[in-house]
Structures are given as structure tokens and as C-alpha cells.
Amino acid sequence: MEQIKVELLPSIYSKEDNTLDIEKVINMSGKYAGVCYNKEGFNKLLNEDSEKTKRRAMMTLNNGHHSVFGHTHVTLNIENIPKILAMILNNEKEFNTSEKSARYTPVVRTDDSIITKTEEDLYNKWMDIFTDRINEEYKEEFNPNKVNKLSQENARYLVTTFMPTKMIYTTSIRQINYIVSWMFKYINENGYKDEFNSKLCDSMMDFIFELERLHIVVDGLIQNDKNRSISLFGKDLDKKEIHYGDNYSTLYKASFAEVAQAQRHRTLSYKIEMSDEKNKEYFVPPIIEDNDSLVNEWLCDMEKVKDVTPQGELVKVYECGSFDNLILKAKERLCTHAQLEIMRQTRKTLEEYYNNLSPNASLTKEDIKPYLKGARCTFPDYNCNSDCKFKEGKTLKRKI
């Protein structure tokens, strides 16, 4: 399995050896902490006695008032991070991320790769099948490069959610330490009870080790006094309330791949819950839905890789947020260029909103109607600058 590598990108807080100057961070945080009661302002604090600054910083660090440590951000270049671990980071709200697209990344197995020979073989097999099917349906609409990308997007459903990826990740020194504390909690509670958790906990430990090597981990910030947890994983989601009003909450099944796309809408909240081993289900790409033989073959091949937790495995998803933010999601996902699975689910959520709107909401069905006509280019308050000229895309009837 590829080793996670984390590099601290240069900032005013990085040392010559590319580690974090944590003493400098703590010192500056101590100065920030003095702003709330210093009559002469921040500029005076910049020149105060260093011991006084340090005492204030340590007092703040130890009494749980950690907001002053949120002013300092670190930017990390992370390589070989498993996709599922990237999803864990991306589900926490305070961050910026630039991640290598898994949708259009060819799967290439190396000697030390976590990807198995079976995954590689099935990926290549279905690349060919999807290419043929897309050409049969849409040869006039898509050029060979587009067809290849769409084939990659669908074949990767057979590949493990531990597939390594790359990302640039920026968050505050406070937040990254909180995440470390939540990872420690997850490891303690889930340990090595199954293959999925064994690999995930190992990945978490590798990531934490890298942060410690870079001097990013601060003891006072990883106490987790409020007993918070990683936000991605939920429990008993079937018992959650489904509601459509000024705000909404809904429950559906989606692949890991779709969830990773959904997380980009940080104004909405997502939790997932995996099924037990006896009740696994898998996403079936719509381009093969009308061919029973191919559907059966797809599901049989999914069973061959079930032990590696493929990205096409369906999980329960609990999504909640405001109507306005759901419309912002629709303005991204109801589009020809969006991943098909998330496009369909976003459309379905809007339809359920319309059909089940709470009578107590200030929102009305007339508010929802304009967003049910088709793709985002049909919305009254969206301006499309790049017409796809693809009818099935605009009507949301496409199969790929």
C-alpha cells in the first residue's frame, strides 16, 4: 500500500526544513488573544514582552478557548491519500481543497499499489464495454476524448474507495488538530473490527504521523473535551426525520463516488452509513440499465471486488440543509457536465421537495416549480455561458 506523504507548503510559519514553526504560531496566537481586552490595540501587542505573550497563549491553549489558533492556516500537499480519507477531510467544513479528479483519472496498478489485479482487469474490461455502449448511444454527440473520460468515470466504480489520490488541503492549525483528535477517537472506537476499518485506521495513523513529523500537532488542541467525532459517519440513519420545509432533511442511497461529489457543497451536511456484509448493493450505470445481461454481469463483477469496498458500493446518505443551498447545489449538478448519479439524485430531491412540502413552511410549491423544468440552463436565475447543445442533457434524460 502506498505510503501517505504530506508536505507543508511555504508560509511565514514554516521553517527552512519545511516543518511548522509551532512556537511562532503559539506566540502569534497569544497576541491575537490579547485583542479582546487590550485598550491600545493589536499594534501594541506586537511589541509586548514575549513572556507575557507566552503566558497568555498557554492559558488560552489550556482553557479550551482555541479560536485564536484558527487565525493561522497551513496548506498541505498530500500524496497517496486514500480516497475515503480525503472524503473524511472534505466533510469537515473549514477547509479549501484542490483534489485530483477521480472521475477522469486512469487506474494504473503498480507493484506497491493497494489496487488488486482483479480491480485492474475489471476496470479495463468495463472501459471497453462502456466505450462501446456510449458510442452506440451518443457517437454523434461526443468526441472520442469525451467518450474515454465518461468510460473512465463509470469503470472506476469497480475500484476501491482506498484508491490513492492527491490533494492540496488548507485549514487552520486549530481545525487540523481537532481532526487529529477525532481520528484518534475513531481509531479507539472502531479499531480493527473489520477489513474496512483496519485499512482506514492504518491510513489515519499514517496521516497523523506525517502531521507530527511536520510539527503540526499541538497537545493542547487535541484534547477533544467536547467529545466530537468525524462528521462523515452516521449511525441508525433510518431513524432520522425526513422533512421538507424552509429547511430540509432527506435520506437516500448513493455510491461513495457520488458522496465525494456531494461534499463539494459545504453549505449542506452529509452523513453516511454502510450496509452490513449480507446486504451490500451497488450502483448500476444507466448506460447499461436496459441490458439485463450487462446488468447481471456488472453486479457479478461488483461481487468479485466487494471485499475492497468499491466506489460503486451504495451507502445510506443523510443530507440536510436549507432550500436556498439546495438550489445552489442544483445550479451545479443539474447539468450535462455533472456526474450523472448526483444529477439524478439532486433532481429527485427537488421533486420530493415539491411533493412533500410542509404546509407550515413559508416556502411554496411555486418557489420550487422553476427548478423542475430541466437542467440549470432552464432556471430563471441562472445564466449559462457554454451551451452544451445536448437535448438529453438539458431535459435530464441522458444515460451517461
Image (tube, rainbow, N blue to C red):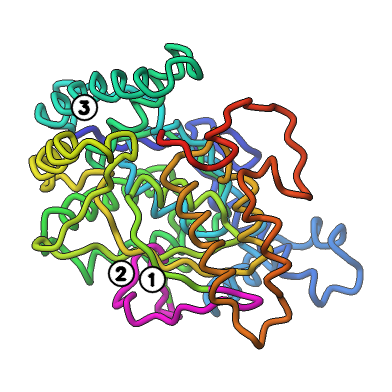
The answer to whether residue 181 of the structure is visible from this angle is: no
Residue closer to the observer: 50 or 114: 114
Which residue corresponds to the image point at 58% horizontal and 28% vertical from the top-left? 390
Q: Relative to residue 105, is residue 250 depicted above or below?
A: below
Label 2 belongs to which residue?
Answer: 185
| Magenta: main secondary structure | loop
Residue placed under numbered mark 3 in the picture: 123
| Residue denoted by label 1 | 229
Q: Nearer the viewer, mark 3 or mark 2?
A: 3
Image quarter of the C terminus: top left
In this view, the residue in front, 74 or 38, is 74
Does the stretch in magenta take in 249?
no
Q: Secondary structure at mark 3?
A: helix
Circle 1: residue type: Ser
**Number of callouts:** 3
Choose top left, top right, bottom left or bottom right for residue 364: bottom right
Residue 90: horizontal and vertical position, in percent?
A: 47, 51
User: What separation in Å lies between label 2 and label 1 (alpha carbons)?
Assistant: 7 Å
Please report the bounds of the magenta region as a residue range.
225-248
Q: Quadrant of residue 340?
A: top left
